[in-house]
Amino acid sequence: MERQVSSGAEAGRFLISLEDLDSVIEDQSSGLTTSGNANEEENGQDESGLLAYWQNIGRRHQVQVPVDMAEPIQQLTRNNQPQDREMVPFITIGHEKKGDELLYEKRQYKKAKWACVTEHEARYEQSTSMGFMKLMKYICQQNSSGLFLGLSLPIVTIVHTNQTRSELQPEVTIAYNLPAQFQDQVPQPFDAEIAIEEWPAHVIYTRPFDGTTNESSILREINQLSGHLDFPEQIPQDTFIVASYNNPAAPVRHNEIWFIQRL
């Protein structure tokens, strides 16, 4: 990863994100989505309903969801079933436990290409929302191949802290791992703000955590994982990754904090 990660807002859940997609799927019984056999009129009503649903969420948190998000929202909602998701591959090379508690896991990730977009909005939740919406458009056919690229997990957010790790900085980078079939021939984004980066093979130390991902929980998990590692010189001092796997409305929400080992 040729950014600081390779070397080293406001409380509230991420908005307009993978988590919101799952929330929409859970609302299918309320008529927010239709079956694959719906006619064009029904599909149009469905698309409008989904857009309105997201716009309502956004307004409550000062995030604007533009009209041109209707089709990407529809596509990702339709294709966001567990069997449609591809996991970013890794090899577990070690772990540390205390009783039954996993303190951290050590993993090897191979070289891979990621689509990345960096935001600098005034509020943390606005940056994550804006970044993810741009990636959604790229995934949903707004790329040189014209194809729906598919969803890979986790969606990761690169965050930066101050020196004392007590505050998140405004700049965040949202990153999407290109599915295996697109790693060699990467569809180019139409959006100039999205960069395709090749992250080198790297080792990470990771700790899982359940619950809402917000500024408070991210800072807490960063400091907890740091406290379990005995080699601070091998980890970054102010740059970390939050990996998100599923919906916060689910009974068990799975997230991870990642530290990239220095080379």
Image (cartoon, helix red, strand yellow):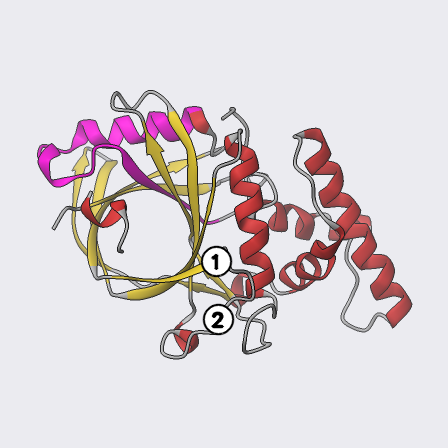
Toward the viewer: 85 or 74?
74
Question: Residue 126: which disc?
Answer: none
Determine whether, in the image, residue 149 is placed left or right of residue 169. Answer: right
Residue placed farthest to the front in the image?
A: 192
Residue shown at the point (25%, 24%) measured from the top left: 163
Badge 2 element = loop
Determine whether, in the image, residue 37 is placed left or right of residue 20. Answer: right
CA neighbours of label 2 inside 10 A, class few (<14), some (14 to 19), many (20+): some
According to the image, label 2 marks what residue?
188
Residue shown at the point (26%, 55%) measured from the top left: 2
Residue range highlighted in magenta: 216-245
Q: Are marks 1 and 2 in contact (CB under 8 Å)?
A: no
Toward the viewer: 37 or 56?
56
According to the image, label 1 marks what residue?
194
In this rendering, the answer to whether 176 lies above or below 56 is below
At label 2, the amino acid type is Gln
Residue shown at the point (30%, 31%) measured from the top left: 222
At label 1, the amino acid type is Ile
In this rendering, the answer to whether 194 lies above or below 5 is below
